[in-house]
Every structure is written in structure tokens, then in C-alpha cells.
Image (spheres, rainbow, N blue to C red):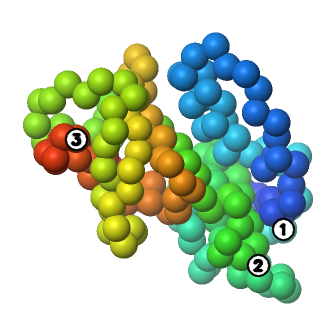
Amino acid sequence: MKIGQIVEIPENSSIYNREKPSFQSKEEELLWKIAQRNYTLFDGFIVGEHNGVENFEIGQRKGLNISGKKNSVYVIAIDKLENRIFVGQGKSHLGLFTDVFCFDEEQISWLEKTKIENDANVKVSSSVLIDNVDAKFYKFDQSYFLEFETQIPLIMKNYTIGLSYENKDVIVLNK
């Protein structure tokens, strides 16, 4: 077990206000959006230590052993490679929401062999959501993307997600 750092990302961090560049392709845009969640030690400040990233998940607020903060602290990202947990204060912290998810082939279970075109409209369901939400489905090489019309809870990545296409349940995405 290796001790790691817990880094707080302030909600007013410039990481959330980066100007969107022009893109050559939709894939480039989606990858840029995903990269916005690649926090580093220099995006915030150290507020504690942990005993292993495997003990944490996105959205968790208990067991962080961080006190003296104005608001509750939530896990907003986990960097397994650097052994860091990134946290943000408050349940409305920008780091707890996203409009793009990325998945790879191992996380996908096809319920029905249906060819889904890029930029296809899909309905997304999850136990985290009250209602299904609309998204666009994209596949580039071995990566799959869901781009949502509005910000959704990042915690949804911790749960099974269902996709419906043309009124058929076609895919289950697992964390």
C-alpha cells in the first residue's frame, strides 16, 4: 500500500474556463473535452493523504479524512498512475459534472448487434438518472463516446449505463 496525495481543485480554477479551440474533427473535440478532466498536482493544492486509489470512486465524500472545509468534499477524479485523488468542495462543484463520456471495447456489452452510425441519437438510462437523457453516440477506432446535450453527474460512470437506439435496447456500458 502506497500513500498518495489528495489534491483539491478549486471550483473557480482556470481549468474550467479554458477557451474552446477550433477542431479539425469531432474526434479531436471529444478528446479535448475528456482531457479537461485530466487534473494535475499543479491545478490545485494538497489537502491530505490516502492509502490507495482503489478505495475511492468518483462522487465519494465519506472516508476522505478532510476536515475544516466550508462545504463537503467530493472525489472528482482519480489518477491511478500518479496515485492521486482529486477533490472539490460542494455538491455542485463543476468537477462533478460532464457532457462527454468515453468508453473502450471491454466496457461494452452489446445486447443486440445493431450498427450505430456516428452522430446517432441515443437515449441513455442509468439508476443515477430520474429520466432517460438524450446523447449522441460516436465511435472512433476502439473508443466510444457519448456526448450529452446537458451536463450530467460524473458519478454515472460508476454505474451501469444502458443505451437505446431506434427504440431498442442495444448496449450496456459498465465501469
Q: In which quarter of the image is residue 165?
A: top left
Q: How many marks?
A: 3
Q: Mark 2 points at which residue?
A: 66
Taking the view exactly as shown, the residue that stands out farthest to the left is 112
Q: Are marks 1 and 3 in contact (CB under 8 Å)?
A: no
Q: Residue at x 28, y 39 (%)?
A: 108
| 1 or 3: mark nearer the eye | 3
The tag on residue 47 is 1
Percent across and percent down for residue 115 are: 20, 25
Earlier in the chain: of badge 1 and badge 2, it is 1
Earlier in the chain: of badge 1 and badge 3, it is 1
Q: Is mark 3 on a helix, strand or loop?
A: strand
Work out whether 140 lies above or below 62.
Answer: above
What is the C-alpha distance between the residues marked 3 and 2? 43 Å
Q: Name the residue under label 3.
A: 165
Q: Are marks 1 and 2 in contact (CB under 8 Å)?
A: yes
Percent across and percent down for residue 69 are: 83, 82
Left or right of 173, for residue 41: right
Q: Disc 2 residue type?
A: Ile
Does the image show residue 2?
Answer: no
